[in-house]
């Protein structure tokens, strides 16, 4: 299949990119790594008039230490995210489960987040870690907390003329453990359900817990009830299983050929228990 | 129409291309480098895998304009002076291909895998090739071929350094 | 000269040279001067009336040469053929290459564009206006057969195309008063063959002659049928199957695109190319399987089978493809499998639905049959509290009973089920795994272990022409080969089979090297071009070696006969005194007289001194038409781990011991088994072509139709027993489909075995995690 015609802009700085995007109007699309967008273009499911290609905006590829957080540039590839020692472990581990090596060479951190695919793995991780999305537009820079960023199916809080430039991922202390539990039918298939978990350990008990779910609704969902149930309790598999019983609360899972809503709710409970247990033992 | 300059298998090309032209169509239809085939629309099959600046990419999911200023290596650029690359030889020796349609992409992906991990386990090979589908071999001999190439290439590297 | 025999040696493939270097001739690689590109507009509806279609806006687009709707070809196009009218009264609706008034499956082509390049062609499709009036889509076979059902073909008055019956023995008596009767329903899901190379066609017209390159398994059949359908005389059509990237049955058709490209090329006088995209192919390449199997067995308390009854519904899709109606018949003879019984009753109805037409997919009929019988043999074992191996052993044909005529009327020439099973059990460590299974059950481990068994056989080497005639098939089953001795003593052979991954250039070369006593390197095999290989019946049904290989042996024998006559003349000896051994002719008992065949070939080419009346040629043509099918068999054992919390299934161990008769090239045989296993396992666990109620295929891409990767499959343990076929001089049986036929029931049987303590006796394929989990839920009464 062959993409429909579009015009193409290749800025080399963030300022140029923002200008190009705001000048291009409603039917512009940002091309980051293209690993989700190119198939949509080829199937003619996306028909932008203008593509703003960030491939040469090198400043967006930066990953830097921001003291209490790590800043990951939107155009950092999955490949570089996995390898950069600055990147928080949950982000790196989860990124390693995204697609396959060739896709990870092109696919970008910011692209995966801005695409806001509820089956994508990184949005849930951003939610669990209370990351902050940094957007730029002609009006200036804006911080968007992860909890406000994922608005609906394939829809983020970004305005049409806003560019995601990167994400501030808070650092968590050494007493935190992490795990991303991805459940899919084949290695390269999308997650039917995924669970991002972070557990703060303290003397055999759970001092803090963060849980977010992939593909349990039109956007990633924070499993707050699980977090409350787990926090303060023992760091045991049994306690996590019990806490995870609340994992499907307030979810709205899709039904498709990979699984019914009921099955996904069940998986959310099982996988949450596993993710918490793994996070606590890491 | 953007003008691009791209080095493919050691030869530099300059061409005007439509922005929407896929890299794989540029290689096949414009440069006549038909060694790289196309197997799907959705980045799943990996038949079109090439190296861009040394990293594997699926050339159906990269625009030709994005290859501007880059180096592309295809299956046709492996081996020197008619000699097979050790990976090509290993695929032959281990009968790691039948119809051969996935083979160019599989070989390029396997090279990328060994670039990252010169001594992969069977499991690492299987996971490393998850983005390349083969319908003929059941992958068993592909895994063996990559193992063999890993041994051959490490052996060769040792000879060079010693 | 003594050299190691080629037959049996793991010769590395000579075809690899081009495939590993990218110097391959895929059809999409073909370039001819003035080539134009074709794109098809396809129905987005499963069933609709075309109330209006206007292609003229497409013609206005830049770079567009022509645009046509079905109406533009209405007078010129003829229906696509079905070569297998399985009954006299089979309902056989016209299947027009370009739909004219009505579309009956999503993806059916309604219009086409010819443009200067692929991009312009794709763009111009968007400009075509089509008005559709949606009609009710018939999506369910059982609904389709009900009184008053909506019709796929309203003028036919029925959705049933045929009912075909095979009966032997008194089935009613076998079931009457039988101590054990077991009835089951199994569902064969719809599969999409997914050869890695999408289809592609190039047609180049010169004057009134046409050369077609096509990604086809069947260049010879294609040429003949194209000639019949287009009325272009056969001698004016040359078909080339260049390098073809896999088929698995999906490239045996004569397709709408091939016919329409031919007609359009004739009309325009221009060469045309069409290359399918994957998402287009998932809609339009014929699909496989899609059957509902009602199977019943009657047995005695000791486990001995009395009778077998099968009622089958086979989904034909919207139209009858080339051999689609016959696919279930290829399974009909295999339900009894390796087992002895007194009676068999098989009834199959073909049903039309508004889905992509079905046809042969790797195994074609036999995987379905093997699946059903092997699954129900497990049920019998459970019913009688016997080990599933034991219940099979009590029923199978014993080694000393061969040749054995089965209840289906086939005569199995050879087999050794005992040996294959014994070897498999040892490699599998069956008893150890059973012990682990018991332990996990005891402990209530959330991960349960299951063991699946498939003691399969199949019929391949398709096929004896006489039998095909009895089954109403519109073609023969023989094969052709030709061997040419070149002046320098090298050998060029032409084969009628058409490989697309099977390695015929290597295997056939090995046969010639041994038969003629020439170095393997001195042989070159030509195939897949009707200009060089003018006759043949191509490659499908594991026939190439068992039929084509024997034709090649026959051609070699003729070369030797001719050379012997020339040698006798040159040696001034009587022909009866000349012997041929190791590539040389000599006077019996006098090694010093030895003359290599190359020397004879040179002398014959010179023709200075030939026997009176002898032509200056050793070249020979031969055919082979088998008397019988061949019957590979084997025992496959599979252990799976089932995560009862999520339903996820992991293959822990897979052992395949196959008996494919004499092995020419073990490397290639192992490769065929590996690939066959992968496809059979994929049916069990991963793949399904899914339609929604409106007739939309929801698995149009590889993101939805899950072809497994290396990371999803285990390492296979393969081994062999070798019981030569007695029906051909090579002793070969065929190996292309065995792995696929055998593996599916072994995997599903293992899953069911793991869950048996819960009272589960089936999980519908593909056994997705959700289906496994749901089965567990249902068994536990719905409480999670």
Image (cartoon, coloured by chain):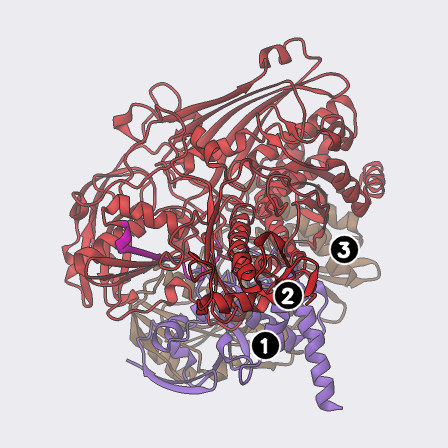
Say which of A117 and B34 sits in front: B34
Chain to which the residue tagged by mark 3 belongs: A
Q: Identify the image quadrant of the C terminus of chain A.
A: bottom right
Residue A265, by quadrant, is: top right
Instruction: Tell me residue C5's x, y (percent).
Output: 68, 60
> Mark 2 or mark 1: which is in front?
2
Nearest the eye: C433 or C722: C722
Q: Regarding mark 2 in the picture, which secondary structure is present there?
A: strand
Q: Mark 3 points at which residue?
A: A232
Q: What range is drawn magenta here?
A: C234-246
Q: In which quarter of the image is residue C26?
A: bottom left
Asked whether residue C468 is in view, the answer is: yes
**Is C381 rendered above or below residue C450?**
above
Quadrant showing the N terminus of chain A: bottom left
- Residue under circle 1? A80
In magenta segment, residue C76: no
**Residue where numbered disc 2 is placed:** C594
Residue C51, given in percent of the width and then of the height, sits at 18, 40
Q: Same chain for marks 1 and 3?
A: yes
Residues at marks 1 and 3, CA–CA distance in whole angstroms: 36 Å
Chain of the residue that carries numbered disc 1 in the rendered image: A
Q: Colour of chain B?
A: purple
How far apart are the alpha carbons under marks 3 and 2? 94 Å
Q: In this view, does C679 lie above or below C757?
A: below
Q: Chain A is drawn in which colour?
A: brown
């Amino acid at each position: 299949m062959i993409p429909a015609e579009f015009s193409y802009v290749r800025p080399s700085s963030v300022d140029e990119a923002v200008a190009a995007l705001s000048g291009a109007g409603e039917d512009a699309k940002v091309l980051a790594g293209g690993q989700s967008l190119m198939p949509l273009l080829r199937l003619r499911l996306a028909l932008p008039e203008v593509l703003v290609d960030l491939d040469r905006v090198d400043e967006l590829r930066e990953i830097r230490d921001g003291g209490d957080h790590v800043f990951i540039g939107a155009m950092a590839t999955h490949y570089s995210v996995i390898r950069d020692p600055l990147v928080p472990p949950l982000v790196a581990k989860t990124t390693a489960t995204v697609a396959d090596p060739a896709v990870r060479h092109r696919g970008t951190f910011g692209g995966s987040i801005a695409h806001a695919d509820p089956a994508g793995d990184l949005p849930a991780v951003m939610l669990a870690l209370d990351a902050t999305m940094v957007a730029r537009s002609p009006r200036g820079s804006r911080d968007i907390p992860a909890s406000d960023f994922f608005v609906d199916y394939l829809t983020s809080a970004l305005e049409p003329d806003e560019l995601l430039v990167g994400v501030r991922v808070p650092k968590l202390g050494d007493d935190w453990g992490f795990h991303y539990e991805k459940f899919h039918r084949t290695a390269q298939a999308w997650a039917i359900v995924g669970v991002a978990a972070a557990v703060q350990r303290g003397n055999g008990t759970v001092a803090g817990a963060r849980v977010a779910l992939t593909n349990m609704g039109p956007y990633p969902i924070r499993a707050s009830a699980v977090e409350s149930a787990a926090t303060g309790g023992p760091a045991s598999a049994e306690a996590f299983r019990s806490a995870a019983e609340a994992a499907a609360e307030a979810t709205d899972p899709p039904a498709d050929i990979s699984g019914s809503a009921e099955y996904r709710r069940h998986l959310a409970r099982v996988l949450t228990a596993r993710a918490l247990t793994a996070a606590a033992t890491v | 129409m953007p003008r691009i300059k791209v080095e493919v298998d050691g030869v530099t090309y300059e061409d005007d291309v439509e922005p929407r032209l896929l890299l794989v169509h540029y290689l096949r239809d414009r440069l006549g480098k038909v060694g790289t085939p196309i197997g799907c629309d959705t980045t799943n099959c990996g038949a079109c895998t090439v190296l861009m600046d040394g990293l594997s990419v699926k050339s159906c999911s990269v625009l030709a304009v994005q290859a501007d200023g880059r180096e592309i290596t295809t299956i046709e650029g492996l081996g020197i002076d008619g000699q097979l690359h050790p990976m090509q030889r290993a695929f032959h020796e281990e009968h790691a291909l039948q119809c051969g349609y996935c083979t160019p992409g599989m070989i390029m992906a396997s090279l990328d895998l060994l670039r990252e991990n010169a001594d992969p386990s069977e499991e690492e090979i299987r996971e490393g090739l998850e983005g390349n589908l083969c319908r003929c071999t059941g992958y068993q001999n592909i895994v063996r071929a990559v193992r063999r190439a890993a041994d051959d290439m490490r052996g060769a590297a040792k000879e060079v350094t010693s | 000269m003594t050299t190691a025999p080629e037959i049996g040696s793991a010769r590395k493939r000579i075809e690899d040279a081009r495939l590993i270097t990218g110097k391959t001739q895929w059809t999409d690689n073909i370039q001819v001067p003035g080539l134009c590109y074709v794109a098809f507009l396809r129905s987005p509806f499963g069933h609709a009336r075309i109330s209006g279609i206007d292609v003229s806006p497409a013609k206005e687009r830049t770079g567009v040469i022509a645009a046509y709707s079905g109406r533009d070809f209405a007078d010129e196009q003829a229906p696509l053929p079905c070569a297998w009218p399985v009954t006299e009264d089979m309902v056989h609706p016209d299947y027009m290459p370009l739909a004219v008034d009505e579309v009956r499956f999503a993806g059916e082509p309604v219009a086409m564009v010819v443009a200067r390049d692929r991009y312009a062609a794709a763009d111009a499709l968007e400009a075509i206006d089509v008005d559709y009036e949606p009609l009710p889509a018939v999506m369910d076979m059982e609904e389709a057969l009900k009184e008053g059902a909506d019709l796929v073909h309203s003028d036919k008055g029925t959705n049933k195309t045929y009912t075909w019956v095979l009966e032997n023995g008194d089935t009613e008596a076998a079931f009457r008063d039988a101590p054990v009767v077991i009835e089951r329903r199994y569902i064969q899901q719809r599969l999409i063959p997914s050869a890695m190379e999408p289809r592609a066609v190039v047609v180049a017209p010169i004057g009134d002659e046409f050369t077609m390159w096509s990604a086809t398994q069947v260049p010879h059949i294609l040429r003949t049928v194209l000639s019949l359908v287009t009325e272009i005389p056969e001698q004016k059509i040359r078909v080339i199957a260049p390098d073809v990237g896999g088929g698995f049955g999906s490239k045996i058709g004569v397709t709408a695109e091939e016919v329409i490209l031919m007609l359009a090329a004739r009309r325009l006088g221009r060469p045309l190319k069409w290359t399918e995209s994957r998402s287009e192919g998932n809609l339009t390449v014929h699909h496989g399987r899609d059957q509902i199997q009602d199977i019943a067995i009657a047995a005695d308390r000791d486990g001995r089978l009395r009778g077998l009854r099968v009622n089958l519904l086979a989904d034909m899709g919207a139209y009858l493809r080339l051999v689609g109606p016959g696919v279930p018949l290829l399974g009909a003879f295999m339900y009894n499998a390796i087992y002895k019984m007194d009676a068999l009753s098989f009834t199959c109805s073909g049903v039309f639905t508004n889905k992509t037409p079905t046809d042969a997919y790797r195994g074609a009929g036999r995987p379905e049959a093997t699946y059903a019988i092997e699954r129900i043999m497990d049920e019998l074992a459970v019913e009688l509290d016997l080990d599933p191996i034991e219940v099979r052993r009590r029923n199978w044909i014993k080694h000393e009973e061969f040749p054995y005529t089965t209840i289906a009327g086939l005569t199995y020439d050879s087999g050794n089920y005992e040996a294959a099973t014994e070897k498999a059990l040892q490699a599998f460590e069956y008893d150890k795994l059973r012990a682990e299974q018991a332990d996990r059950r005891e402990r209530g481990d959330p991960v349960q272990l299951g063991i699946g068994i498939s003691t399969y056989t199949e019929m391949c080497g398709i096929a004896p022409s006489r039998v095909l005639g009895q089954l109403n098939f519109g073609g023969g089953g023989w094969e052709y080969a030709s061997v040419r001795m070149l002046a320098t003593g090298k050998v060029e052979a032409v084969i009628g089979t058409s490989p697309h991954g099977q390695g015929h250039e290597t295997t056939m070369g090995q046969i010639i090297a041994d038969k003629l006593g020439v170095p393997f390197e001195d042989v070159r095999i030509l195939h897949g071009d009707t200009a060089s290989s003018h006759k043949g019946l191509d490659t499908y049904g594991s026939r190439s070696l068992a039929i084509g290989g024997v034709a090649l042996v026959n051609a070699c024998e003729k070369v030797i006969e001719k050379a012997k006559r020339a040698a006798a003349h040159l040696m001034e000896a009587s022909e009866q005194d000349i012997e041929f051994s190791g590539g040389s002719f000599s006077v019996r008992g006098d090694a010093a007289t030895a003359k290599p065949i190359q020397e004879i070939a040179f002398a014959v080419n010179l023709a200075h001194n030939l026997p009176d009346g002898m032509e200056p040629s050793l070249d020979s043509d031969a055919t082979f038409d088998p008397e019988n099918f061949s019957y590979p068999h084997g025992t496959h054992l599979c252990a799976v781990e089932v995560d009862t919390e999520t339903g996820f299934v992991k293959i822990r161990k897979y052992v395949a011991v196959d008996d494919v008769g004499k092995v020419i090239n073990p490397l290639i045989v192992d490769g065929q088994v590996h690939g066959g296993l992968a496809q059979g396992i994929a049916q069990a666990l991963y793949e399904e072509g899914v339609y929604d109620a409106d007739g939309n295929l929801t698995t149009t891409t590889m993101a939805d139709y899950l072809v497994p990767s290396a990371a999803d499959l285990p390492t296979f343990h393969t081994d062999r027993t070798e019981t030569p076929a007695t029906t051909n001089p090579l002793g070969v049986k065929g190996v292309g489909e065995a792995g696929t036929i055998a593996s599916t029931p072994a995997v599903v049987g293992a899953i069911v075995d793991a869950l048996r303590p819960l009272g589960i006796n089936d999980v519908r394929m593909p056994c997705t995690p959700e289906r496994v989990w749901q089965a567990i839920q249902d068994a536990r009464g719905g409480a999670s």
